[in-house]
Image (cartoon, rainbow, N blue to C red):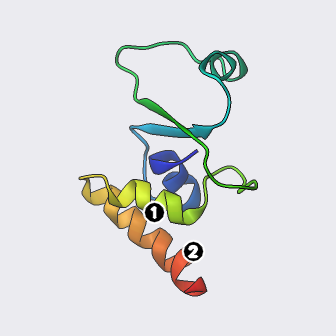
Amino acid sequence: LGGEPAGDLLTGYLRPEEFIFYSNESQINLMKSYDLKPNANGELLVYEKFWRGDSGATTPPLLVYTDLILKDDKRCRETAQKIFDEYIQPIL
């Protein structure tokens, strides 16, 4: 997971409205594996995974930060700052 759901998992500060999922699976396999069904009102974005390794339940914190900071939403930006402070700043 990336974006808002990952921000929620990392901080507990955000209730996701838009879901971002990174995967190398085909659309059909994603639908079968995760029991996804098309929904005209759904907010699920699927992007190709482009990094190596497994980062656990979420994408790497830097990517979560990037997904959130690009949103025009105050709560997403606050969550991004929390992720920066806790996960990114210590390794800079």
Q: Percent from the top left, x then y, of residue 38?
A: 48, 12
Q: Percent from the top left, x then y, of residue 59?
A: 60, 53
Secondary element at image label 2: helix
The answer to whether 18 is drawn above or below residue 67 in the figure is above
Residue pictured at 52% horizontal, 66% vertical: 62
Residue that protrudes farthest toward the right in the picture? 53
Q: Which amino acid does the dot numbered 1 rest on? A: Tyr
For the N terminus, the quadrant is top right
The answer to whether 67 is drawn above or below residue 21 in the figure is below
Secondary element at image label 1: helix
Give the residue at mark 1: 65
Residue pictured at 39% horizontal, 38% vertical: 17
Left or right for 39, reference 23: left
Give the residue at mark 2: 87
Residue pictured at 56% horizontal, 64% vertical: 61
Crowd tier of the residue under label 2, counting other residues whose Cα lies within 10 Å: few below 14, some 14–19, many 20 or above: some
User: What mark, if any, has residue 56 been given in the picture?
Assistant: none
Crowd tier of the residue under label 1, counting other residues whose Cα lies within 10 Å: few below 14, some 14–19, many 20 or above: many
**Image quadrant where residue 40 sits:** top left
Do the residues under discs 2 and 1 have CB atoms within 8 angstroms?
A: yes
Q: Which amino acid does the dot numbered 2 rest on? A: Tyr
